Image (cartoon, helix red, strand yellow):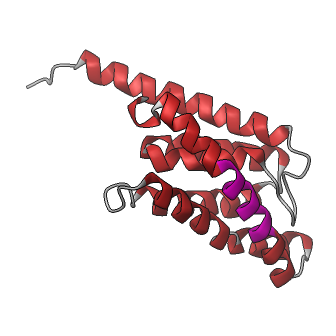
Amino acid sequence: MQEKINPTGTLSNVRVLTINGVVAALYVALSLITPFAAGPVQFRISEALNHLVVFNKKFLWGIFLGCVLYNALFGYGMMDVLFGGGQTLLALTATSLLQKKIANPKLRLAANTLFFTASMFLIAIMLHITAAAPFWATYGTLALSEAIVLVLTAPLMYLLNSKLHFADRF
C-alpha cells in the first residue's frame, strides 16, 4: 500500500532545509568578518546563532553545518571539523533537550551559554594536539571568549525572538 504524499509535510521539510541552509551560510559569513574566529582566542560573532536553538531546536542542524563548513574551510581542517563540530553538536543537543524541561527562555539562554563555555575544553584539546597550545591556558581563553560572546548576544537574540518568533519559523 502506497502512502499519500502530504504536501504540507513536504513544504515543511523544504522550509526546514532552506532555513537551516540560510543559517549555515550566515554562520560562515559572520565567522569570516570576525577578526579572531580561530585559534586560542575566538570571538566569533557567529556564535550568537547558537542561541537560536533556545527558541527552536530545528535550528540545530543549520548552526552545526555552518560551524563544520567554517572549520573545514578556514579552521584547522579535519581535526577542527571533528572537535569543533562535535563541541557544537554536544552543546546544541544539551540545550535542545531543555526545551520541554525549562519553560523560561532566559534560563535556557543562560544554560546554553554555560554548555558552550564549558564544552570549549574540546577545542582546547584540539589546539593542544594540532598547535601544541598549552591546554589549561587555551581552555581558559577559549571559555572566556565564548562566554563573552554568548553573554553579550543573549539579550539581542531574546529581543530578536520577541519580534521574529523563532519558534514559529518552521
Q: Is residue 146 magenta?
A: yes
Q: Is residue 47 left or right of residue 111?
A: right
Q: How many marks?
A: 0
Which percent across, then down, holds residue 77?
A: 80, 54
Give the residue at x 37% y 55%. Answer: 99
Name above or below for residue 3 compared with residue 131.
Answer: above
The quarter of the image holding the N terminus is top left
Q: Say which of 129 and 113 sits in front.
A: 113
Q: Is residue 155 left or right of residue 55?
A: right
Residue 15 sits in which quadrant?
Answer: top left
Name above or below for residue 116 compared with residue 121.
Answer: above
The quarter of the image holding the C terminus is top left
Give the residue at x 63% y 36%. Answer: 24
Q: Looking at the image, can residue 68 be seen?
A: no
Which percent across, then down, holds residue 43?
A: 82, 54
Give the residue at x 85% y 55%. Answer: 38
Give the residue at x 74% y 55%. Answer: 149
Q: Which stretch appears magenta?
A: 142-153
Q: Say which of 127 and 161 sits in front.
A: 161
Residue 133 sits in which quadrant?
Answer: bottom right
Name above or below for residue 164 compared with residue 49.
Answer: above
Provide the major secondary structure of the magenta segment: helix
Q: Is residue 159 left or right of residue 40?
A: left
Q: Looking at the image, can residue 126 be seen?
A: yes
* Residue extending furthest toward the left: 1
